[in-house]
Image: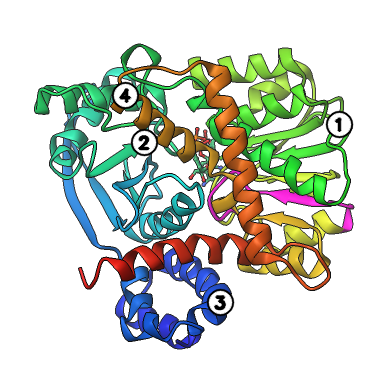
């Protein structure tokens, strides 16, 4: 297999899907050597079968807004690979959603889920519907209309969706309600459910907490303490909020958060009371991060991203390609020693190259943000057993899984000088398990 040739071929067959090409390129380049040590993989054309999703379902979603106007959006589910377990991956509601974005996310999810050691395949879904500015009733009607199509594709042992950008507890609840109505079954088909109807404790916290646990493992390899470090976080949604919560608990100083309109810089650090304000602002009132700057009299940069602010650690937790090569160089110039990705593919290839060349600790999202899907996997287990674990139990397992992912990255990504290439480590570890499962199951 020549990574460049496979990629050129995929670009010809799927033109214009730039996010998908970007994600595939990163993985192919890092697994090329290992893949070529296995001639049986090449004979089975494993690489194309692994890069191209098993299936993509697309459908129109029709719903009625509060003024009585009939609206349409597109809905999708990309079922990428189910070699090691049922398809599993979130649903994204955002105006920017395209098949290319969902294909990149489903591809990444396959390797991430493999890394968790839990039996989950990879998928992703979503719609170009944006909940921003919509009333609660509109969001409910949209979620119901979306599920009216999606329910045929999913099931507890087939495909288990969850949340992502624009899909939190509220949206999962509405989708689950409709799913239950249509199937007349109360099963664990969605994760991220409310605690009263099958949700798991620590699921909302899992991605953010997991990212901090992974960061701790990375810092440990260099004998560095988290306490007292200055951290720049982007985003102010689910992942960002719980990343900041854990960072505060462990004594780090978080100086930035953002949304799609801009970022705030708080030189004194976001403390528990200020984070409570953000959580209420974002989760209850669905307000803008600008309001934090007004409330606490700090700097707000409209249209900006936080990477120009001085920090020791950066944790991008908003969206893909939100940290460019220039941003990376700025972070490095300001003395940044670690980057741990809460979002999926937030760093551009140029930014990743800059981090790798500088030799700082750099963890790609598929390793660092795998805590979310891990606890989703634990939610599936609890649903199947019809019981609930305590928060301490789930958190303990989450901790263990993140440590385990770090160990796998070290196993496959150790450089001759003893440092760890987390990109290579995560990609190779994730790939090998899926590849072996696919080989064992024949040409299906
Ligand atoms: P949320 O919708 O809760 O929050 C997303 C945040 O990112 C918001 O602050 C949002 O701002 C901001 N944002 C979204 N799009 C853009 C954009 N184009 N430019 C700038 N800012 C943007 O989503 P999550 O916190 O759940 O997800 C964040 C990231 O983490 C995504 O990459 C997701 O794929 C990834 N992830 C999420 C997991 C989870 O468990 N939820 C698991 C693993 C990864 P605004 O409010 O203005 O839209």
Q: Residues within 10 Å of mark 1 (few under 14, many from 20)?
A: few
Q: Residues within 10 Å of mark 3 (few under 14, many from 20)?
A: some
Q: Residues within 10 Å of mark 2 (few under 14, many from 20)?
A: many
Q: Nearer the viewer, mark 3 or mark 4?
A: 4
Q: Is mark 2 within 8 Å of ligand 1?
A: yes
Q: Secondary structure at mark 4?
A: helix
Q: Position of residue 175 (x, y in %)?
A: 25, 28
Q: Which residue is mark 3?
A: 29
In-image side of 356 versus 398 (left or right): right
Q: Residue at x 70, y 69 (%)?
A: 353
Q: Are marks 3 and 2 in contact (CB under 8 Å)?
A: no
Tell me which label, 4 or 2, sits earlier in the chain: 2
Q: Which residues are magenta?
A: 333-346
The residues bearing labels 4 and 2 have C-alpha atoms spaced at a distance of: 19 Å
Tell me which label, 3 or 4, sits earlier in the chain: 3
Q: Which residue is mark 2?
A: 162
Q: Which residue is mark 1?
A: 227
Q: Secondary structure at mark 1?
A: loop
The residues bearing labels 3 and 4 have C-alpha atoms spaced at a distance of: 41 Å
Image position of 193 with respect to 421: above or below: above
Tell me which label, 3 or 2, sits earlier in the chain: 3
Quadrant of image for the C terminus: bottom left
| Residue 385 - label | 4
Q: Nearer the viewer, mark 4 or mark 2?
A: 4
Tell me which label, 1 or 4, sits earlier in the chain: 1
Dividing the picture into quadrants, the one containing residue 243 is top right
Q: Are marks 1 and 2 in contact (CB under 8 Å)?
A: no
């Amino acid at each position: 297999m020549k990574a460049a040739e496979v990629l050129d071929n995929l670009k010809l067959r799927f033109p214009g899907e730039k996010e998908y090409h970007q994600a595939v390129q990163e993985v192919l380049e890092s697994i090329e050597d290992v893949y070529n040590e296995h001639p049986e993989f090449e004979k089975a054309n494993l690489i194309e079968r692994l890069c191209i999703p098993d299936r993509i379902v697309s459908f129109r979603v029709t719903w009625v807004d509060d003024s009585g106007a009939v609206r349409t959006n597109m809905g999708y589910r990309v079922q990428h690979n189910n070699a090691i377990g049922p398809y599993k991956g979130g649903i994204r509601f955002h105006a920017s959603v395209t098949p290319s974005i969902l294909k990149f996310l489903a591809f990444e999810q396959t390797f991430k889920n493999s890394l968790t050691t839990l039996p989950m395949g990879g998928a992703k879904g979503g719609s170009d519907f944006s909940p921003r500015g919509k009333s609660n009733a509109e969001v409910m009607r949209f979620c119901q209309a979306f599920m009216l199509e999606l329910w045929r594709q999913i099931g507890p042992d087939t495909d288990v969706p969850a949340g992502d950008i624009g899909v939190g507890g509220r949206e999962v609840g509405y989708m689950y309600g409709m799913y239950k109505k249509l199937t007349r079954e109360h099963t664990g088909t969605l994760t991220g459910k409310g605690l009263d109807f099958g949700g798991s404790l620590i699921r909302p916290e899992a991605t953010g907490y997991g990212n901090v646990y992974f960061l701790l493992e990375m810092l440990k390899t260099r004998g560095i303490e988290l306490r007292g470090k200055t951290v720049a976080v982007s985003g102010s949604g689910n992942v960002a909020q719980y990343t900041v919560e854990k960072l505060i608990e462990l004594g780090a100083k978080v100086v930035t958060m953002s949304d799609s309109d801009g970022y705030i810089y708080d030189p004194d650090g976001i403390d528990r009371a200020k984070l409570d304000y953000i959580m209420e602002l974002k989760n209850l009132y669905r307000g803008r991060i600008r309001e934090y700057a007004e409330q606490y009299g700090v700097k707000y940069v409209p249209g900006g991203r936080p990477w120009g602010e001085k920090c020791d650690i950066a944790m991008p937790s908003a969206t893909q390609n939100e940290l460019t090569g220039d941003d990376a160089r700025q972070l490095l110039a300001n003395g940044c020693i670690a980057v741990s990705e809460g979002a999926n593919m937030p760093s551009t290839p140029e930014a990743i190259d800059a981090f790798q060349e500088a030799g700082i600790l750099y963890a790609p999202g598929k390793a660092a943000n795998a805590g979310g899907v891990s606890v989703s996997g634990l939610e599936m287990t609890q649903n199947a057993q019809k019981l609930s674990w305590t928060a301490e139990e789930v958190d303990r397992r989450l901790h263990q899984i993140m440590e385990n992912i770090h160990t796998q990255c070290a196993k496959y990504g150790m450089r001759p000088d003893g440092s760890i290439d987390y990109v290579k480590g995560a990609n190779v570890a994730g790939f090998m398990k899926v590849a072996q499962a696919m080989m064992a199951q024949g040409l299906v």
